[in-house]
Image: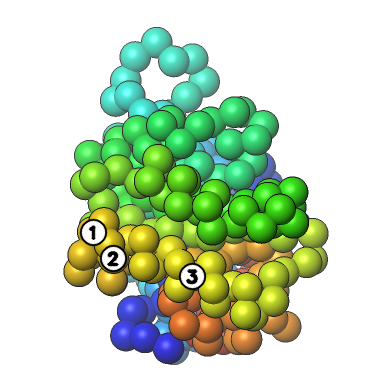
Amino acid sequence: GSAIRPLVAGNWKMNGMRDSLAQIKHVSESSALAISNAEALICVPATLLHSAAVMTAGTPLRIGAQNCHHEEDGAYTGDISAGMIADSLGSHAIVGHSERRLVYRECDASVRSKAAAAHKASLTAIICIGETEEERIGDRTLEVLRCQLAGSVPDGATAANTVIAYEPIWAIGTGRTPSIADIAAAHAFIRAELSGRFNGEGDRMRLLYGGSVKPSNAAGILEIDHVNGALVGGASLMAADYLAICAAC
Ligand code: PEP
């Protein structure tokens, strides 16, 4: 429980064709969203970004991207800059998702520069951190989180331009989640680290939990201290599930 307005951020990953825009339209027009306490955001593939953003203009649903390049422009075939996301009317960019860290070997320094690029383009950066199963078993979770926060969050981070998503890697897409006590401990630790570095801004920065959030476990997770919303992968692909998670806020 806190005064920070929760954010429910969907992450469609590499899913969604143009006909999926009907889901976006349905979510954006839903009465469940209109009465939810949550701020709602869906991060779509870049191909759908502009269409989704135009379609949802004037509704409570924001549209974001799942990654950005750290440079403003240049010879980076296949990449998309934060400025392009803003120009497409996206409001947020996820950076440092574990799939990018693991599959594309993005390191903390790269994530930090991407977050700074997002800030420069007036986007809100959703910076993802989280331990592997091996690190969890080895009791290194908090040490890993401390390193990732120090390395991935740029100095210009504020409560308005930055969201931190705690996503234990072993909980993503697996149906497994940490215990309520373990989520509470991780979020309290992240809050203390951010408050120590960013003072009042760190006190107010949103901390999302991500990893197998679904309608049946959302309420229990969202009521944990210092959990200010959720980052939702699989369940965000189904409008009814996404809306049920928003309604649980
Ligand atoms: C994610 O990809 O950020 C995520 C949390 O996925 P899922 O909800 O499917 O575990």
Residue designated by label 3: 187
Cβ–Cβ under 8 Å for marks 2 and 1: yes
Separation (CA) of disc 3 from disc 1: 16 Å
191 and 66: which one is in front? 191
- Work out whether residue 163 or residue 244 is closer to the camera in this orientation and state it: 163
Give percent across and percent down for residue 132. Answer: 68, 49
Name the mark on residue 195. 2
Check disc 1 and report the residue beneath it: 198
Compared with 107, 28 (above or below) is below
Does the residue at mark 3 contact the one at mark 2 (Cβ under 8 Å)? Answer: no
User: Residue 71 appears at what percent x and percent y?
Assistant: 33, 24
Secondary structure category for the residue under label 2: helix
Of the image marks 3 and 2, the number of the one nearer the N terminus: 3
How far apart are the alpha carbons under marks 2 and 1?
5 Å
**Horizontal arrangement in the rendering, residue 166 relative to residue 75 (left or right):** right
Q: Quadrant of residue 212?
A: bottom right
Q: Badge 1, how many Cα within 10 Å: few under 14, some, many 20+? A: some
Which type of secondary structure does the marked residue at label 1 adopt? Answer: helix
Residue 193 seen from this side: yes
User: In the rendered structure, which amino acid carries the disc numbered 3?
Assistant: His
Q: Amino acid at mark 2?
A: Ser
Measure the C-alpha gap from mark 3 to mark 2. Answer: 12 Å
